[in-house]
Amino acid sequence: MRASFHVVALLGAALSFNALAQGYPDKAVRVIVPFPPGGAADIVARHVTTRLSAVIGQQIIVDNRGGAGGIIGGEIAARAPADGYNLLFASSSVLSINPHLGAKAPYDVIKSFTPIVKIGDAPNVLTVHPSVPAKTVKELIVIAKAKPDALAYASNGAGTLSHLTGELFSQRAGVKMLHVPYKGAAPATIDTVAGNVSVLFAAYPSVSAQVRAGRLKALAVTSGKRLAVAPELPTVAEAALKDFESSQWWGLYGPAGLPAAMIERMNAATNKVLVTDDIKKALALDGAEPSGGTPAALAAYHKADFEKWGKVITTANIKAN
């Protein structure tokens, strides 16, 4: 009798699971972007959610909640009901980097969210001023080792991905370069083009025109694989430093406790969007490429990225501005 009861219970749970998956979503879904409109995360989120809305047959409302380095939007998402209608479009800066820079968040970046799918990556490009006599990453490392702190590298600001990428490169290559922080990508690029600094790690759209014009030399990309819009550039890992990777990435998350049926439904729908040529072309304009994959793959990637940047930041004693 007890065995029959368990069988009936399991069948009932399976039927409820399927019904939930089939019926979800049946109204508009809110996707919280923890940054103001117009930034990279917002642009990528709108590219993806516009197409995702067509797949799920419901409106997706992008809710920009910027402030405190993404903490405000993150807290709203973490405290939202786990009903599948309140999701978070998070970036690596919010979930992997900022927690190590002294930003105290009222949530746990690992435990407070349910991973759904990794959206995409946007690597940096390692560029140098034409006066630097390096044509490859290995040659740049030789030059930097010969004269510690003689090469200066520009970044978008202390604690930004471009800064951390330069620090990761220095630690992995065993070199010392002087870090010069700027207030954004534009002034960092301008000063590198002018020759005031020698090296720049920057997003592809920030430097592509300067590279084409010969005002900067691109040596490699920092992603795990070559960039589709610049396939001629090797990765840093290919060129010199095995397993080197540094990319801005985005992922779709729900609050902790999001039902499995909802995770699977949104994961499948988003993966369907991410394999289209349309989204590949749209993201390429921002130097990004779609990822996709399983929730488990996103969870593992996030954990490894969180630990990597924690080590880099602690080793270099980096503090945010």
Image (tube, rainbow, N blue to C red):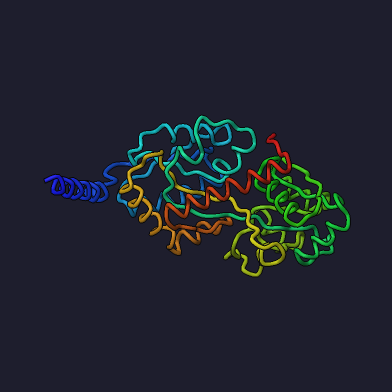
Look at the picture and state if 26 lies above or below 134.
above
18 or 125: which is nearer to us? 18
Residue 228 visible at all: yes
Residue at left offset 54%, top offset 36%: 70
Residue at left offset 60%, top offset 38%: 98
Residue at left offset 73%, top offset 45%: 187
Look at the picture and state if 101 lies above or below 273.
above
Residue 261: x percent and y percent?
30, 48
The reply, left or right, for residue 64 in relation to residue 177 is left
Residue 205 visible at all: no
Residue 23: x percent and y percent?
24, 47
125 or 208: which is nearer to us? 125
Residue at left offset 52%, top offset 48%: 302
Residue 228: x percent and y percent?
57, 65
Look at the picture and state if 102 lies above or below 208.
above
The reply, left or right, for residue 170 in relation to residue 266 is right
